[in-house]
Image (cartoon, grey):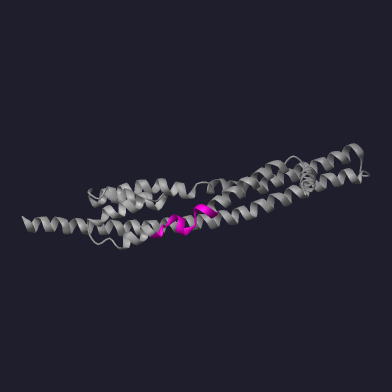
Amino acid sequence: MLDSVIGFLSKGGFMMYPLLLSSIIGLSIMIEKMITLRRKKVIIPEIVNVLDNIKNYEDIDLAISICNKHKGSFANIIKVGLNNKELPKEEIKEVLNDNGRQEVYTLEKGLSILETIAVISPLMGLLGTVIGILKVFDVIQTKGMGQANLMAGGISEALITTIAGLIIGIPSLIIYNYYTNKAEGLILEIEKYSSSMLRKIATFKEKKEGTKHNAV
């Protein structure tokens, strides 16, 4: 098996090695995103449950303690909002936006590399094709048209690198689009819960201030 892989790589010329490296990097990113972008891993059900059941200002401390038990973008954003509950609504919103931009980068980390692989893999395959064709012309120039075996080697190299580039590039583009859309969907869902949290905090503060005013 290993000998056949090495043989295939050698037939494609030296451009097969950067293509192989690109495929390994792309596969590792795909596996990493398959794990990290699972909905239950990002949108943690326990945090969603506690946010849905916050009934008053005192429940916020419980929600913070639940967030402290978990890691990830969702927990971090919600925790930032709850920890800054004493700030005015617009300032909390600004803090959430600042923190949200950092967490968006975390969720989408690696996808730009996958996009690059999707773009450059066919181009590297095309470069290998040009190199293979040049070898064919070099054989024709030096040996004449009668050296069919030598010409076939250059043509084979050209075709193999083209095929390899497309085999890597097409799935990489599909996977990139899939996980980009998935990350954006999760980001929108986080924004939904953070906006709901912000409205609850504002309501609780109004009730709290109203109670103090009535007491006075």
Residue 138 x, y percent position in the rendering: 84, 38
Left or right: where 114 falls relative to 142? left
Residue 163 x, y percent position in the rendering: 73, 52
Left or right: where 30 falls relative to 183? right
Q: Nearer the viewer, residue 69 or 26?
A: 69
Residue 39 lies in the magenta-colored region: yes
Residue 196 lies in the magenta-colored region: no
Task: In the rendered view, tell whether residue 135 sits above or below residue 75.
Answer: above
Q: Main secondary structure of the magenta part?
A: helix
Residue 175 x, y percent position in the rendering: 58, 55
Left or right: where 86 falls relative to 176? left
Identify the residue at horizontal 8%, vertical 59% (top origin): 214
Residue segment shown in magenta? 34-45
Task: In the rendered view, tell whether residue 63 sits above or below residue 147.
Answer: below
Identify the residue at horizontal 31%, vertical 55% (top origin): 63
Q: Residue furthest top?
A: 142
Identify the image quadrant of the C terminus: bottom left
Q: Quadrant of residue 51?
A: bottom left
Residue 180 x, y percent position in the rendering: 51, 54
Q: Nearer the viewer, residue 130 or 93?
A: 93
State how many labels appear: 0
Identify the residue at horizontal 32%, vertical 51% (top origin): 65
Identify the residue at horizontal 84%, vertical 43% (top origin): 136
Q: Residue furthest left?
A: 216
Q: Nearer the viewer, residue 59 or 84?
A: 59
